[in-house]
Structures are given as structure tokens and as C-alpha cells.
């Protein structure tokens, strides 16, 4: 094989090993997200284990590898690649055993202790293959001498291969699932090993003795001070990667795709920077690298508001378009830094006049071990203590200080005060009003950040508050309609159980959903919440609208998945409340395994209700979730409340309606109003849609994900077609007689039940008409639905809203404004705008006492409304 052809083959093979290495890393990160839940922990521990293994392996093989010929070194690379592939193939077999063992050991541990246990297990689990990958680097450099390849080209091509490997799982996971995707990558790794063994036959087979004198002078280790400085650069580089993952993960794609896009951009920059280093003068650029890299890292922070506003207001024709455009935006902000980081290694080797095979291993090993420390430091110390923005500026400062080790022009130390001056204006993240186009007039009331999430409490212009997790709504706002809808998520399951004594909420959020359980007496409440920021917010900023729920519920700071696996308590009712299922890791809460865990924690006769927001799914995805739910719960059924639906599963047979009515009949009139939201129990029973049919779709499995890879395509494509969603739901809604039989409705109650169900169906027709913009039909459907069931809030509010909108056009000689407002309030006494208008009318007419009464009613309904609180 000619030298030129041999060089190209060697480069391609080594680039391909970089691709498999990063594909393994992304797939293993996915695996670990099942252990760590929705947080950055899995990413940090995976990166730390990888980088520590790479560093240790590089150190280990550098001294020994110099004694081998290029052919023998490349054969060892081939065997290492085969060993990594074999390890990857064995990992799915070991994971259930390891996972079960960790759960047993972790029972009773606090969340931090549990995460520490998992972190230790991850380091032990991933360190061996990473060690092998690290050993391959100096051995590959030694083999490269036989093909006259440089360190810069080998390092650069390997990093570019890694960039491709970062996005490869995005193609494999939706098609094959986690296990099969890992087998595909491992199979490709085995193929690479075979090819590498063949290529090794064409490399020089020099003996160690004949080559010894040639390399002895260059085999010395670089000074420890220089290695330590380059380790610091590695630490700063991984700090930046972790922090960029948090930052751009909030601002841009916010899905399973963001980590892969960031890795793609990061590694592409490293690879290109290494290749460009061949044309850079070491004496010049080692002076400039730390200054330029640190300033570029800080400069990117100035673009955050513009990037977020652009991403939030732009419309993308497809997921691919979104990935390309948003990935390009990430590259614009981070590529200048990563290009410089990639050039550092070959420039240092050249600066110290070392042979590439000796230099690369020492420098690469030091940088990798520093990177492992930097990942842990950023994830577990800097983020909780300093926050994302300040941590990123600290990483840039470390990068500058460590890089100054090789700066000879002392004037460049003036860049340090310059960096601090430039960094100060962006030492904290911009307020939400500058980041989210949807909240332009908002004020940040509270910001809490830890390794799990960044939590904001935001006050809107009208005084209502919103809880944001990583700049995404965790719950609806505190306006009266949203509060009612959230409370309904507790009302329905508690009304469907004849004697609820214990209830578990999987997620606390604002606490408003849990507060819907307060009217139910003799109830023991438990809520599990991963975000400490949400727990704090529920206890303070949302207390006026959640009935000070934190003092009336046992709150457990934990991941819902881990809690269900380790908790030994059982509950009568479990409520799951999930929004933004396309965000990283959240679809695991809609998996087969999660539904099974919930069922195992139910008492006999218990109920599990999983709420979903219809406007965050397409028909295909909602079918997958429903089919998965129905595969776990016998007689799984669906209830509809506005644009939210409840999947209802029973452990055992569903309770007979007679038992539910008996308990309801024993309540006081006040309790009946409070427990049903004033709508009566028949309204809730009338929202029964029917048993979930067999849709024969794939199951949403933790190890074979479906919806987290399909939903982003919907979100960045044509969006959710709610008209099609309603049409599909209506197509399989059960007949009244079948619904009555399923619930056990007596013949004497059939007319009441049928009227309530008619109102529910007409509500859907009403919403379809709203989507079509057909106001005449909206009013027609609302009137019919109201006539069928006056207690149903949806048609009553639809009519009240339109009556209120018509106030400006009252005909002369007709109803007075006061009379029109009273008609609206007769229809819906809790209509916020009508109450406000009555208060203002009394104030204008000088009726102080009457205005105060209306103000009190309005304050009771909406305690956070700004124009009420300020009076």
C-alpha cells in the first residue's frame, strides 16, 4: 500500500474510532438519564468518567507505547477498539442487574447521597472503556509515524469523527431503540477493529531496539508545571461545555437533540482547530490563544438575549431546519473558542520540540484529567453556588490564567483586567423579559439555580405569576382560569375514588394542583418534587393561590422515577402532571416502566391519573402514550377537561358510580362545591370519554423511546393540529349506553348522565368552531351545551366571555351596563373581567361600599391581580 494511501486509510480509520467513541458516550448518557432523571447529573458524570479514563489511559500507554513499532501499536489500537465494542455489547445485559443493585443499596438514602452512589457506580462502569480509548490515542500517534502523519492531523480527524458520532444516535435511537442502537455502534466498532488489523500489516514493523535511540531524547515527560497548566485549560474547556449545555439547552432546542448539537459544534471546533494549527506559528499563537479564547467565551454571553428572542419568535419549517439554524447560532457563539482550544495541543507539542508520539500522550492525558475535574466542579459546585453566567465567566478566567503559562509578552497580562471589565455586565443571566418574547413586560421575582434546573418565578404585567423551569412553564399561571384547571387535576382522581385516604402527587410545581385536594377531608398528602426551586416557590410566591399547601403536604425532594422505585408506601390515588414531554428526559415519565411503577405503589382499588396537555402532542404520539398506559392498566379510560386529558388507570376493578354518589351525597353543600369546583359530580362523570381502545402502536419504553424523537419534529414542523386531534378523539368516543355500563350508572340516573356527556361533546364542537374562527357556531354550541348542563364551566364561560365582549355595543334603550354585567355574573359569578367592571362602575358612581364588596370578591377570586393588590 502506497504511503499516501496508507496515510489516508489510517486517518479515516482513526476518525471512525472517534465517531464510535462519541456515539457510545451519547448512548451511555441516554442510559444514565434513566438513573439520574431530568437533570444535568447524568451528563456530568458521564463526561467526567470518560475524560478521567481518557487521561489515565493516555498516561498509561504513552511510556509503554514508545517501545512498540508502528505496526504493533496499530494492532493494539485494533484490539482496544474490539474490546470496547465487546464491553458495549455486554453493557445492556449488565445494566438491569446494576440498576437493581443500586436501587437496593439506595433505599432510604437522601437525594444527594443517592446521586453520589450513582455517580460512583457510573465512574466505575464507564472508566474501563474510556481507559481503553485513552490508551488508543498515544498508540495511534506512534502508528502514525509509520505513515508520516502529524499529531495535528490525527487529533483533528479523531475530533471531527467524534462530531459525527455525537449526532449518529439521533438517527439510530428513533429507529432501533437504545439496546439495538448500541449493538449497531458496537458492530461497527468490531468492523473497524478488523480493518485496523489488516492495515497494521502495511505499517513499518521496526523493533523497539532499532527505534530506541531515535526516540529516547524525545521520550521525556514535559515539566509538571506545564502539564498542570494544560490540565487547567482542560478543566476550563469542560466547564464551558457543561455550562453551554445548560445555557443553550434552555434557549434553543430544549429537546433530546440539544446535547448532540452542542457536542457536534464543540468537537467540530476542536477538530478544525487542530488541523489549522499546522499553519500556525507556535511562538505567536501561544501568546494569543489564552487572551482570544477567554474574550471570545465572554463575548458570546452578550448575544444571549438576541439568540433567545430570535429562537422564541422564529418559525422553523422542520426539525432539521431548526437544528441547522439553531446549531449555526450555537456555532457562531462557541466555535471561536473551540477552534482555539483545538489548536493548543499541537502548538504545545511543537513549542516543546517533542516527537509527536511522546508529546501527544502526555499533553492529552493531562488535559483529559483536568477536563474530568472541570466537569465535576462545574456541575456540582459552580452551578449551585454561582449560577450559569458567573460560572462561565470564572471558566473563561481560568482559561486565561492557565494559558498565560506560555505567554512571553508581559503586556498581555493587561488582558486580565480587560476581561473582568468586559465580563461584569454579563455576570448574571438576562431577565426573563429579555429572554422570552412571550413575557416582554414581566419582572423576575425569584431565581434559583442548582444542578437540576434554573427556576424562575416571574410576575407578569397584570400581577399574575408563572413558574419557569429552564425557561419553560412548569405550570400555568395564577390567573383564575388557570388555577381552576390546575386544581381540577386533583379533583377528578379524588372524586373517582370512593374512600381516598392517601394521595401522591408526582411533581409539586406551583402547588396549585395539590391545593385542589384541600377540600377533601381526612386526606394524607405527599408530593415528590425534584426541583428545590419549585418547592421554595410553592411555599412563598404561590402561597396566596395554593392555600399555603407546603404546610399541608409531605414534600419529598427526589426524582419521581427513583421515588416510585424505592418508596415502600402505597397510596389510594397517584396524580401525574407532565408538561413539555419533548424536553430532555421528560418522556421517561410517560413510559411503560413508569406506569408500571405507579401501579405497584397503588393500594388495591387505587387510581393513577396521568394528565396530558393535548396541545403538546400530535395524534400519533398521543396514541403511543395511550396504548402504553392501557397495556399496564386494565380498563384504562380517558376523561376530558378542556385541552387537558386524564388517563385513568385502576388497580383492580373501577369503583361503581353508586359508591361515588353515596360519598358525595354525605358531603355538605359547601364541600360539594369545593370538591367539584362548583360543577357537581355528574359534570365530572360526564367528562368520561370511554375506555382506551387498542391502537396497536409501539410502546413508549425507556429503552426504546418513541415520542421524545417524534414530538420535536411536530413542534418544529407543522405544529400540533388540534382540529385533527379533536376529530380523532370524537371518532372513538364511546356511546352513552356503553359509557354508562362501564361506570355502572343506574337507569334512574341515565338522563342526568346523558345530559352531562352531551355537554362535554358539545364543548369539543365549540372548541373546533373556535379553531375555525366560526363565532356563530361557537355561540350555538355553547348555548346547547349550557342548556344540557348549566353547571359545566366551559360553555358558561364561552357565553359569558362573548357577552362581556359585546358590552361596548349595547343597543340604545336596551339593557344598561349594570344590568348586562349582572347577567354575565349570574351566568358565571367568577367571571374576572365582569367583576372588575362592576367594581369600576361602582367606583365611578361614588358607591364606595358597593365597590369595596366587588373588590373583595375579585380579590378572593384573583388575589395576585396587580390592580387589586395596589388599592
Image (cartoon, rainbow, N blue to C red):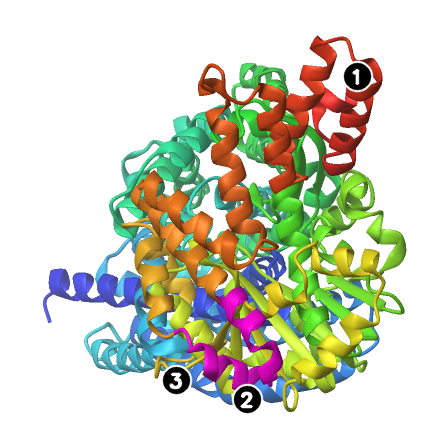
Q: Which residue is mark 3?
A: 694
Q: Earlier in the sequence, mark 2 or mark 3?
A: 2
| Mark 1: secondary structure | loop
Quarter where residue 589 is shown: bottom right
Range shown magenta: 733-757
Which residue is depicted at the point 70% across and 79% down?
Answer: 565
Specify the principal SS of the magenta part: helix
| Residue at mark 1 | 871
Q: Nearer the viewer, residue 793 or 489?
A: 793
* Residue 750 covered by magenta stretch: yes
Which badge, 1 or 3, is on the more N-terminal residue? 3
Residue 606 vertical position relative to residue 643 in the rendered view, above or below: below
Q: Residue furthest left?
A: 2
Can you tell which mark lies on residue 63? none
- Residue with the mark numbered 2: 634
Task: Compute the Cα span from label 1 to label 3.
Answer: 56 Å
Residue 185: x and y in percent read: 34, 76
N-terminal label among 1 and 2: 2
Q: Element under label 3? A: loop
Q: Residues within 10 Å of mark 2 (few under 14, many from 20)?
A: some
Closer to the camera in the image, 640 or 268: 640
Q: Quadrant of the C terminus?
A: top right
CB contact under 8 Å: marks 1 and 2: no
Q: Quadrant of the N terminus?
A: bottom left
Tell how many labels: 3
| 302 drawn magenta | no
Amino acid at each position: 500500500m502506497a504511503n499516501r494511501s496508507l496515510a489516508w486509510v489510517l486517518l479515516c480509520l482513526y476518525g471512525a474510532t472517534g465517531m464510535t467513541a462519541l456515539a457510545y458516550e451519547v448512548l451511555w448518557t441516554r442510559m444514565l438519564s434513566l438513573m439520574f432523571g431530568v437533570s444535568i447529573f447524568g451528563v456530568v458524570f458521564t463526561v467526567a468518567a470518560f475524560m478521567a479514563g481518557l487521561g489515565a489511559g493516555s498516561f498509561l500507554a504513552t511510556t509503554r507505547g514508545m517501545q512498540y513499532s508502528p505496526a504493533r501499536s496499530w494492532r493494539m489500537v485494533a484490539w482496544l477498539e474490539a474490546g470496547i465494542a465487546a464491553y458495549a455489547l455486554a453493557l445492556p445485559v449488565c445494566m438491569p442487574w446494576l440498576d437493581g443493585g443500586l436501587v437496593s443499596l439506595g433505599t432510604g438514602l437522601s437525594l444527594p447521597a443517592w446521586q453520589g452512589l450513582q455517580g460512583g457506580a457510573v465512574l466505575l462502569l464507564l472508566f474501563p472503556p474510556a481507559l481503553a480509548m485513552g490508551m488508543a490515542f498515544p498508540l495511534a500517534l506512534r502508528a502514525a509515524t509509520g505513515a508520516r502523519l502529524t499529531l495535528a492531523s490525527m487529533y483533528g480527524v479523531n475530533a471531527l469523527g467524534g462530531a459525527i458520532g455525537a449526532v449518529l444516535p439521533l438517527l439510530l435511537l428513533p429507529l432501533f431503540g437504545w439496546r439495538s442502537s448500541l449493538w449497531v455502534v458496537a458492530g461497527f466498532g468490531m468492523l473497524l477493529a478488523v480493518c485496523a488489523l489488516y492495515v497494521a500489516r502495511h505499517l513499518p514493523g521496526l523493533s523497539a531496539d532499532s527505534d530506541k535511540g531515535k526516540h529516547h531524547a524525545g521520550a521525556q515527560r514535559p515539566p509538571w508545571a506545564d502539564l498542570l497548566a494544560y490540565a487547567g485549560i482542560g478543566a476550563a474547556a469542560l466547564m464551558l461545555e457543561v455550562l453551554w449545555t445548560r445555557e443553550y439547552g434552555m434557549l434553543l432546542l430544549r429537546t433530546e437533540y440539544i446535547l448532540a448539537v452542542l457536542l457536534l459544534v464543540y468537537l467540530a471546533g476542536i477538530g478544525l482547530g487542530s488541523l489549522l494549527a499546522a499553519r500556525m506559528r507556535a511562538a505567536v499563537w501561544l501568546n494569543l490563544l489564552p487572551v482570544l479564547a477567554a474574550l471570545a467565551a465572554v463575548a458570546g454571553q452578550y448575544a444571549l438575549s438576541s439568540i433567545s428572542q430570535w429562537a422564541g419568535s422564529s418559525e422553523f419549517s422542520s426539525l432539521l431546519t431548526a437544528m441547522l439554524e439553531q446549531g449555526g447560532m450555537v456555532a457562531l457563539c462557541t466555535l471561536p473558542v473551540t477552534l482555539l482550544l483545538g489548536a493548543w495541543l499541537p502548538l504545545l507539542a511543537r513549542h516543546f520540540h517533542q516527537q509527536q508520539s511522546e508529546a501527544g500522550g502526555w499533553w492529552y492525558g493531562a488535559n483529559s484529567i483536568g477536563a474530568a475535574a472541570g466537569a465535576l466542579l462545574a456541575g456540582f459546585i459552580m452551578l449551585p453556588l454561582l449560577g450559569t453566567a458567573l460560572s462561565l465567566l470564572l471558566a473563561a478566567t481560568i482559561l486565561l490564567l492557565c494559558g498565560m503559562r506560555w505567554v512571553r509578552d508581559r503586556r498581555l497580562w493587561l488582558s486580565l483586567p480587560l476581561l473582568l471589565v468586559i465580563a461584569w455586565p454579563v455576570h448574571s443571566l438576562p431577565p426573563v423579559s429579555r429572554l422570552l418574547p412571550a413575557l416582554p413586560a414581566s419582572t423576575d421575582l425569584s431565581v434559583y439555580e442548582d444542578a437540576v434546573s434554573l427556576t424562575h418565578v416571574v410576575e407578569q404585567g397584570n400581577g399574575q405569576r408563572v413558574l419557569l423551569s429552564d425557561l419553560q412553564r412548569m405550570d400555568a399561571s395564577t390567573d383564575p382560569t388557570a388555577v381552576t384547571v390546575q386544581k381540577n387535576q386533583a379533583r377528578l382522581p379524588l372524586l373517582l375514588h370512593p374512600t381516598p385516604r392517601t394521595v401522591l402527587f408526582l411533581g409539586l410545581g406551583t402547588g396549585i394542583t395539590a391545593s385542589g385536594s384541600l377540600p377533601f377531608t381526612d386526606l394524607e398528602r405527599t408530593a415528590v418534587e425534584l426541583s428545590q426551586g419549585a418547592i421554595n416557590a410553592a411555599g412563598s410566591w404561590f402561597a396566596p393561590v395554593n392555600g399555603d399547601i407546603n404546610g399541608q403536604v409531605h414534600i419529598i425532594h427526589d426524582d419521581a422515577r427513583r421515588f416510585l422505585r424505592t418508596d415502600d408506601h402505597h397510596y389510594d390515588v397517584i396524580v401525574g402532571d407532565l408538561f413539555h414531554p419533548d424536553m430532555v428526559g421528560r418522556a421517561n415519565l410517560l413510559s411503560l416502566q413508569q406506569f408500571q411503577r405507579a401501579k405497584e405503589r397503588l393500594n388495591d382499588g387505587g387510581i393513577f391519573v396521568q394528565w396530558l396537555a393535548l396541545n403538546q402532542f400530535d395524534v400519533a404520539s398521543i396514541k403511543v402514550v395511550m396504548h402504553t398506559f392501557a397495556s399496564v392498566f386494565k380498563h384504562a379510560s380517558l376523561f376530558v377537561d378542556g385541552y387537558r386529558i386524564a388517563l385513568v388507570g385502576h388497580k383492580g376493578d373501577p369503583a361503581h358510580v353508586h359508591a361515588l354518589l353515596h360519598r358525595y351525597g354525605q358531603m355538605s353543600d359547601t364541600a360539594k362545591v369545593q370538591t367539584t369546583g362548583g360543577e357537581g359530580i355528574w359534570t365530572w362523570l360526564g367528562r368520561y370519554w370511554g375506555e382506551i381502545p387498542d391502537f396497536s402502536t409501539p410502546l413508549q419504553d425507556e429503552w426504546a423511546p418513541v415520542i421524545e424523537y417524534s414530538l420535536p419534529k411536530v413542534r418544529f414542523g407543522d405544529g400540533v393540529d388540534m382540529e385533527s386531534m379533536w376529530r380523532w378523539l370524537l371518532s372513538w368516543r364511546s356511546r352513552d349506553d356503553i359509557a354508562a355500563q362501564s361506570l355502572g350508572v343506574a337507569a334512574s340516573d341515565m338522563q342526568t348522565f346523558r345530559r352531562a356527556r352531551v355537554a362535554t361533546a358539545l364543548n369539543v364542537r365549540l372548541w373546533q368552531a373556535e379553531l375555525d374562527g366560526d363565532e356563530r357556531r361557537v355561540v350555538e354550541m355553547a348555548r346547547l351545551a349550557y342548556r344540557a348542563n348549566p353547571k359545566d364551566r366551559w360553555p358558561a364561560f364561552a357565553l359569558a366571555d362573548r357577552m362581556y365582549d359585546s358590552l361596548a355595543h349595547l343597543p340604545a334603550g336596551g339593557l344598561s351596563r349594570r344590568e348586562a354585567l349582572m347577567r354575565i355574573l349570574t351566568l358565571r359569578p367568577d367571571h374576572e373581567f365582569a367583576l372588575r367592571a362592576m367594581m369600576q362602575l361602582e367606583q365611578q358612581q361614588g358607591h364606595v361600599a358597593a365597590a369595596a364588596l366587588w373588590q373583595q370578591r375579585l380579590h378572593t377570586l384573583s388575589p395576585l391581580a396587580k390592580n387589586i393588590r395596589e388599592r
